[in-house]
Image: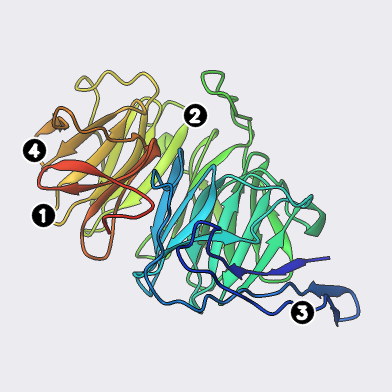
Amino acid sequence: MTKNILLYTLLLPFLLQSCTGQNKKESLMKENATDSIKKEPIVTPKNTAPFSFVNNGPISQVVRTIFQDSKGNLWFGGEGGAFKFDNTMLLPMVGIQSETGKGVTVKAFSEAKDGTIWIAHTDGVSSIKGETVHNYYKSDGLISNDTWCIAVDAQDKIWIGTINGLCIFDGTTFTPLELPEGVKDTSVGISSTKMIHAILQDHNGKIWIASNAGLFSYTDNQLVNESKQFGITTPFVTKLFEDSKGNLWISTKEGLYVVQKGVVQNLTRGKIEIGKGIGSVTEAKDGTIWIVANQHFLYTFDGTKLKEFQQKEGIKRPVPFEIYKDQKERLWLVGFGGASRLENGTFIPVTKNGPW
């Protein structure tokens, strides 16, 4: 039975002005004689002033991911759950929860054609459309509640990567897609032989899958192990990125690969001491590629030279999980310590009150 919960448009108790709402009695609506929807009251703020936290600080102590939707809203996910900045105020998303009603850690966002936001987290997956949250769990057919990545393809199918493998959701049924058994990464706290780290659909419609069994592609109902032909010897492929020229960037525990016009190159071999490997990758406005390495360091690549980024002294930035370019072509960095945005050559902290 699918658990559907109305999303609170919630302002925390720290609002400078109070807001009121009319509680409604819970009711159950039958869907197809099996499903039911639990209604919860919607709290609508009466004030329209920008949201202000009395106790200003990081959006969350740990922000794992950032995403901007087609309407320009910024989404932040981490150990504090999900937050949305709608260009006016920062709102915590209440209703995204475990099957037992507990909070979750958000790991990834994606968006469907109709504007539905899909969210991968520590206790299943959730979708937000308008003011309605739908939570899906293993009891609904999901192969694992411990989800790590999510992507919506061109046919609006939801690809979900978990600690126990990959499945595809068509709106009704979760269908597993079996990958070969991989290797457990003993250098990290959470890992498995079936771990899926990232899913990407490229400009040609091909699905790419990063896993603990290597790199795979999926097209025309065929799964292909791409690691062998790309010369990737580690089983641990962690992140995927496609740049504005259609080049595919592949982050692994042994380095960063780039596929340009069918030619594969390990960009970091002999240039960066890898350690824990390469993480998030994005592209700046000028075409420069930004790279997270060893979970601590930032590098830039201008097409010729790989260079470590040096933060100005006295200004702290997060220990990075992800680097991201928004629709205004501004670079964001999120991780341990919250969120920062690149301004005039340095990453400045963005707190609950901005600056936005």
Going from N to C along the chain, the mark reached first, 2 or 1, is: 2
Q: Is residue 173 left or right of residue 227?
A: right
Quadrant of the rendered structure where residue 126 is?
bottom right
Q: Amino acid at mark 1?
A: Asp
Report the residue marked by disc 2: 235
* Mark whose residue sits in front, 3 or 1: 3
Task: Tell me the residue at 54%/42% (across/down).
Answer: 79
Q: Amino acid at mark 2?
A: Pro
Going from N to C along the chain, the mark reached first, 2 or 4, is: 2
Query: Closest to the observer: 206 or 196?
Result: 196
Q: Amino acid at mark 3?
A: Lys
Going from N to C along the chain, the mark reached first, 3 or 1, is: 3
Evaluate whether residue 262 shows in this view.
no
- Crowding around mark 4 (Cα neighbors within 10 Å: few <14, some 14 to 19, many 20+) is few
Q: Secondary structure at mark 2?
A: loop
Q: Is there a contact, CB below 8 Å, between mark 2 and mark 1?
A: no
Task: Tell me the residue at 42%/65% (across/down).
Answer: 205
Q: Secondary structure at mark 3?
A: loop
Q: Secondary structure at mark 1?
A: loop
Q: Is there a contact, CB below 8 Å, between mark 2 and mark 3?
A: no
Report the residue marked by disc 1: 286
Q: Is residue 180 left or right of residue 230?
A: right
Q: CA distance from mark 4 to mark 3?
A: 62 Å
Badge number at residue 24: 3
Q: CA distance from mark 3 to mark 1?
A: 52 Å
Going from N to C along the chain, the mark reached first, 2 or 3, is: 3
Quadrant of the rendered structure where residue 179 is?
top right
Q: CA distance from mark 2 to mark 3?
A: 52 Å
Q: Is residue 63 left or right of residue 138?
A: left
Report the residue marked by disc 4: 304
Image vertical order of residue 147 relative to residue 195, above or below: below
